[in-house]
Image (cartoon, rainbow, N blue to C red):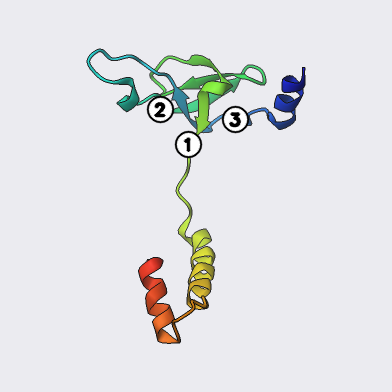
Amino acid sequence: MKTKIRYDAKAKAPDFRPNDILWLYNPKKIRGFTRKLQTNWEGPYEVIKRINDVVIQIQKSPQSRVKTVHADRLRQVERPVDPERAKPLADAFQQEKTSLNIPGLRGKETQDECSRCFP
C-alpha cells in the first residue's frame, strides 16, 4: 500500500490534446540486429481524439489508419527553441561567463580561459 501512495503522489495524467505531435513507443525485434541499437520510437503521430484520460487515438498521416494506444506509450515531440526566446538566456550566460573569478587568472586572461571552457 505504501508503494501505491508514493506512486500516486508523483504520478500525473498526460496532457495530450488534439493536433499535438507525439512519438509512439513500439519496440520491434528485427532478426539479425541487436535490440540495443534498434529504434523503439515511431512517428511523429498526431493526436486525433482523446477517448479517456489514458487512451488516445493517433494518426501518422491523413491517409494512414487511426491507432488507439495507451498514453504511457506516447511522448511529446520536443520542439526547437525559438531563437528570440533563447537570446536572453544566451546573453545572461555570456554575462555570467565573463564575470567568473578564477583563482590565478586576472583580467583578460579570465575571459580567454573561460572561452576555452565554455565555447
Local crowd size for mark 1, using a 10 Å CA cut-off: few (<14), some (14–19), many (≥20): some
Mark 1: which secondary structure?
loop
Between discs 2 and 3, the one toward the N terminus: 3
Distance (Cα) linking label 2 and label 3: 15 Å
Proximity of marks 1 and 2: CB atoms separated by less than 8 Å: yes
**94 vs 75, nearest the viewer:** 94
Does 78 sit above or below residue 5?
below
The amino acid marked with disc number 3 is Phe
What mark, if any, has residue 55 been given in the picture? none
Residue 56, image x, y percentages: 57, 19
What mark, if any, has residue 77 been given in the picture? 1
Does 39 sit above or below residue 106?
above
Horizontal side, residue 117 vs residue 53: left or right: left
Local crowd size for mark 3, using a 10 Å CA cut-off: few (<14), some (14–19), many (≥20): many
The residue at which mark 2 appears reads as: 43
Does 54 sit above or below residue 14?
above
Residue 102, image x, y percentages: 48, 76
The residue at which mark 3 appears reads as: 16
Residue occupying the far front of the picture: 104
Proximity of marks 1 and 3: CB atoms separated by less than 8 Å: no
> Which of the image's four quarters has the C terminus?
bottom left
Q: Residue at x 53, y 16 (%)?
A: 69
Residue 67, image x, y percentages: 48, 15
The amino acid marked with disc number 2 is Gly
Distance (Cα) linking label 1 and label 3: 11 Å
> Which of the image's four quarters has the N terminus?
top right
Distance (Cα) linking label 1 and label 2: 9 Å
